Amino acid sequence: MSPARWLGFLIVVLAVAPLVLPPFFLQLLTEIAIVGLFATAFNLLMGFGGMVSFGHAAYFALGAYTAALLVKRAGVPLLLALPASPIVAAAGALLFGFFIVRLSHTYFAMLSLAFAQIVFTVIFKWKALTGGDDGLLDVWPPSMLKSPAAYYYFTLAIVGLSILALRAIVDSPFGYALKAVRENPRRARYIGIDVRRHQLAAFVISGAFSGLAGGLFAFYNGSVFPDFAYFTKSFEPLVVALLGGVQSFYGPLAGAFGFKILEWLVSRQWPVYWPLFLGSIVVVVIVLLPSGFVGLVGGRVWRTTAKP
Amino acid sequence: MAHDGQALVLQTRGLRKRFGGVQAVNGVDLAVPPGDLRAIIGPNGAGKTTLFNLITGDLAHDTGHIYFGGEEVSGLPPHRLCRRGMGRTFQITSIFRRLTALENVQTAFLSHHRRHFNILVPARRLYRDQALALLERVGLREQAGKPSGILAHGDQRRLELAIALAGTPRLLLLDEPTAGMAPQERHEIMALVARIAGDTGLTVVFTEHDMDVVFAVARRITVMHQGAVLAEGPPADVRANTDVQRVYLGQPVPR
Amino acid sequence: MSWITNGPLITVQVMSGLSVGMLLFLVSVGMSLIFGVTRIVNLAHGCFYMVGAYLMVTLVEIFPDQPWAFWLALLLAPLGVAILGGVIEMGLLRLIYHRDPLMQLILTFGLILVIGTLVLLAWGPDNKSVSRPDALAGSVKIFGQPFPSYYVLVLALAPMVAVALWLVFYRTRWGMLVRAATVDREMLGALGVNVAALYTQVFMFGSWLAGFGGALAAPTVAVALGMDGDVLTTAFVVVVIGGLGSFAGSFIGALLVGLLQSFGILVFPAISIVLLFALMAVVLIVRPWGLLGRPEP
């Protein structure tokens, strides 16, 4: 089947799902869509930009908490609160990214991790604003969107549009220049590209869409907690993207599907063991696969000029 | 001297750079008029690549001045210099390996026309014709759709040339453009460079080890030795210069 | 801000800042050391600190009524962490030294999840605590201000540990090998040194340091899941400020951060972490590879 046919088939399946599947699976699909968006936004940075963020949960959490706070503390309706998520997340990405893109590789990873932990700590400690460890509860969409099927369609629409937007960005002149920066930053400089500025722009775009995913998740989950900014959440888009293939645009979406199914299967039996399982799988795969994960075959994500 | 600078495309005065204990560039004065085809030659370690890196903003010089098109450009980063019309190729071919040859050149055009922040239109069609024309010019039209990383070495060099030319530079700096090529191909590519330069009025400065190529193409030659300029002039004069002969051959050549 | 002119209060804050800084130094220098020799940033380094603290919880209870129980635990806990480090290095890290640094980072990132869950399974989700030994349970008066006696221990140990480390690195043959390895590992191998064994030793020593930091810190903090994240971030801030791979950099960075946290609480009670961020931001702009680090590893 041609790609267009595949896409059509997929759209039909997704559209018809609520008529066939029980609510639980609709919710699972909703989560898959949200994680897929998060991972695709993450992969804009990793696969297309060559920058690996170990703290992307920061932007997810910023988006989630923005939406939740607006709805709970300011009584703002969802349709106004949700657009605020990517904006606040983008601001966070601009602030952190400004420092992070000045460095590369190891320091980039470390710092992105540190900034996410800072977000976590601020959320955790600023109890008056964020509810701290207790989180914010009763963050529900309006009654029109409350049913699993309704929120499913809503999420699909937002995620679908976002994926289209990200695809357009990747195929645009900006995307070409980003790929050039990934391939060879020095050569990019010598065709007139301000590498740092370009990387920062990509970082902000990635952060914005990650924040949007966080906002969607807040209403899906009905509550937000500090661990939206924790390590485990930062690990998700990384593993999903690697699983699905970082060199392909749609890879992370496929990875999200596989990842969530796996998580569902493991967590329902042994909820406590999921992080252990996840971490172990990653460790084992890295040790055993000579060329890393599927998506990395055919090229290193990082150019390393350091001595081995 | 400052007034002369108005007419010169590139000028350096008293350029110096030290690395630890080594004075890599030791007071280099260079004056390159428009339309020049300048070869910079010298034994390994003479400071040629360091000089290039200073001119293109990759390295900061210790003392001295660099003028491009009459304006002082010391301290400008490479991407700014590129926008002012300076293009460069590298000793080790520097291209975007996983992009196709066409995409390589298209991206260069996109950047040159300042459209590289545009997220609204697909890039595939943009500057496609100009990019193909440029690839045709350097003899790579058939390879346009191939990932540049799999091209033959000589073709990658040509691609790098095309990338640098996409920005319609006023000055092109080629660092050992023929390295790794067979003699026949060396002459071909430098003849190409000379042709393009002649057609567009481009000024070219290149470093080279192959003397046949140098004497075939260059209008003027600057000889460097231990970080400083040893001799400069038209090829015939340089060839006859006894200091140059001593450095290259160990002794003056009998007349 | 009336505390500014309160000399005794400032003295006490400085001392407590220095103690916190010392604990941080132990963790940071371990991480910096491991990186300097093996070129791996161990993202799970904070977990070693956490395991050290949790081991203290258990070991202290082995001989509950003996006055020397605490000291025995303080001796044994870091050794336990060192063993864990050795197992990880020999079982996992050895297999990936030649790999892409990204893969190495992802692997150690995965270890955070693994070790974190194992700690949860072994000790349960509730917060734990370690009591200070009776001799150090109270406080002393510094210029009339109360100051916890336990911190006096930390402050007393601090220069001893720093000097001991300096002696190890600059006055022993092993230390010389370690320093040589940070500069040129291949050369070291070519000279006949068993670099693989050196790596293991360095990793174990680094984990020992983190474990010792955790064990020593245990009576002063809530021993809980998530303490690895806090200390890891702070350690990152320290090495960013001081420079990854630099012993002196870790020392200066750790003390700076410790003091900042201590005074930050007076100025900006809940969110002193913002001050930390500001300091790190300034260093990153002025000297991206840290005060004493080398440009881009």
Image: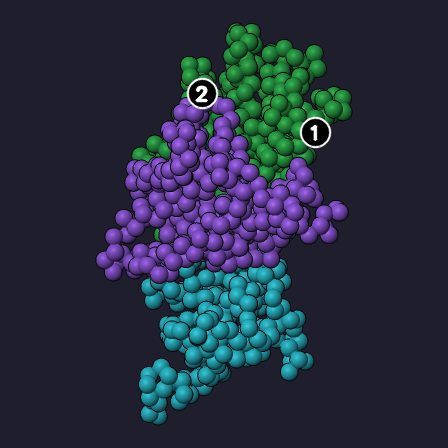
SS class, disc 1: helix
Is residue C123 at all visible to an observer of this figure? Answer: yes
Residue on which disc 1 sits: A129
- Please give the residue where the numbered disc 2 appears in the rendered image: A272
Mark 2 nearby-residue class (10 Å; few <14, some 14–19, many ≥20):
some
* Above or below: residue A143 compared with residue A43: above
In the picture shown, does residue C204 fall above or below A87? below
Label 2 vs 1, first from the N-terminus: 1
The span from disc 2 to disc 1 (Cα, nearest Å) is 29 Å
Q: Which chain is cyan?
A: B
- Please name the amino acid that badge 2 sits on: Val
| Placement of the C terminus of chain B among the 4 image quadrants | bottom left
Left or right: where A71 falls relative to B20: right
Mark 1 is surrounded, within 10 Å at the Cα level, by few (under 14), some (14 to 19) or many (20 or more) other residues, namely some
Residue at x 41% of width, y 51% of height: C33
The color chain A is rendered in: green
Residue A104 on image: x %, y %: 50, 49
Residue found 43% across the figure and 25% down from its top: C123
Give the residue type that dot 1 points to: Leu
Q: Position of residue B196 (x, y in %)?
A: 52, 64
Residue A236 coordinates in the image, percent (x, y): 49, 29
